[in-house]
Amino acid sequence: MFGLLSNDIAIDLGTANTLIYDANQGKIVLNEPSIVAFNRISKHIIAVGKAAKEMMGRTPRDIQIIRPMQDGAIADFEITEGMLRILIKRVTQSWRSTRKVVVCVPQGITEVEKRAVRDSCEHAGAKEVYLISEPMAGAIGVGINVFEPKGNLVADIGGGTTEIAVISLGGIVVSESIKIAGDEMTEAIKNFFKREHSILIGDATAEKIKIEIGSAYPLEEELEFEVTGRNLVNGLPKAIVSNSEEVRAALAPTVNEIVNSVLKLLDRTPPELASDIYTNGIILNGGGALLKGLDKLLKETTSLPVHIPNDPLKSVVLGAGKVLENLNDYMDVLIRGVRY
Ligand code: ADP
Ligand code: MG
């Protein structure tokens, strides 16, 4: 009964988005970009999340827009801590103590980074902090029984990293982690328009092109998109009509690296588990899973079934929420580590 009076939360601290699940309400209560606006002079954080994203590319000199989790690692400890603290405060009532926090971290996170995450949560008031790896949380989030002696292959294509893991008996048997994911796709689109059309486009525009017409496999009906940016030749605004075929070509090298890392992992998977995966297939989580036709391409290259959950951006935080609500059952899947 008294347990209900504390704020127990699960956090997906992603390179692109941070989500928080509240165990009292049994739902996701926060979903914001992992972006911070920082005043270089006063050294104060002035905005976090959507508000900071809106300032991107439009700030005066003193204000810096930071993505503290870039590349799947904590690029800036202090800013990450500040961001976490602000977001945790936003969803917790001050009259309740924050007791348990489950945080998802990238599989390849270093000891120093683990400590930084743990410290940040403790500074935000958490009494007990538990870490879980993203692929594990993602597997639990899509409803896999991770304790079964059965192999499951889960890939998470986020903003900064793609993490792929084979899970069996509550543990990660083999995994691959590459720093190539959604951000690289966006970058590839920017570079393509610069190189092929002499037009400079912003990050937000490039991401929009990726989401609207980006693909990994020929579409049943190819799409068009009006791209606006700055003409590199004369510096004036310029608009051109692009199509899904050329954007697919621009994305291909990045997409291939992701597919190759899945193949590499399959190659390292022990035979018994490989035969489970032959039946169970591949589960795709993270925003990158939504790239059109990625499932088809993976299916074709691996000859395995590929499943994408309804909302692949939420699997990880939902899995972490489930762990939080059943902590005793899931103790063995948490990242073990020394208490600092
Ligand atoms: P992280 O866990 O690293 O925060 P997310 O799982 O939130 O990452 O995924 C964010 C990435 O997914 C971004 O690069 C974003 O552009 C990309 N993304 C989101 N929706 C789509 C879509 N429909 N098609 C392709 N990429 C998408
Ligand atoms: Mg993620």
Image (tube, grey):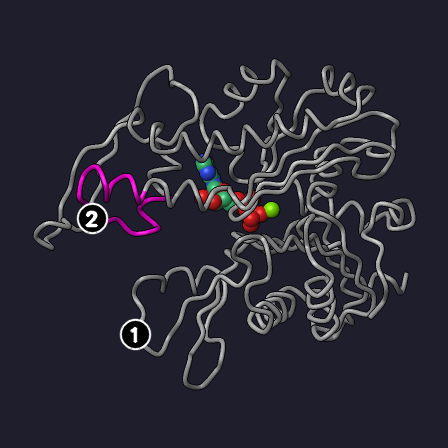
- Please tell me which of labels 1 and 2 falls first in the chain: 1
Number of residues whose C-alpha sits closer than 10 Å to that of mark 1, classed few (under 14), some (14–19) or many (20 or more): few
Question: Does residue 31 appear left or right of residue 189 in this picture?
Answer: right
Label 2: few (<14), some (14–19) or many (≥20) C-alpha neighbours in 10 Å: some
Locate residue 151: give its quadrant. top right
Mark 1 and mark 2: span between their CA atoms? 20 Å
- Where residue 99 sits, quadrant-wise, is bottom right
The x, y position of residue 288, in whole percent, is 51, 37
Q: Secondary structure at mark 1?
A: loop
Q: Provide the residue designation for mark 2.
A: 229
Question: On residue 60, which mark appears?
Answer: 1
Viewer-proximal residue, 157 or 318?
157
Any magenta on residue 94?
no
Relative vertical location of residue 49 with respect to residue 290 in this rendering, above or below: below
Asked if residue 194 is among those painted magenta in the image, a careful observer would answer yes
**Amino acid type of disc 2?**
Gly
Give the tally of numbered discs.
Answer: 2
Identify the residue shown where x is 70% and y is 36%: 165
Q: Is residue 230 left or right of residue 24?
A: left
Determine whether, in the image, residue 186 is placed left or right of residue 146.
left
**Mark 1: which amino acid?**
Pro
Residue 211 vertical position relative to residue 302 in the rendered view, above or below: below
The segment highlighted magenta reads 190-207
Q: Position of residue 16 (x, y in %)?
A: 52, 52
- Location of the C terminus (image quadrant): bottom right
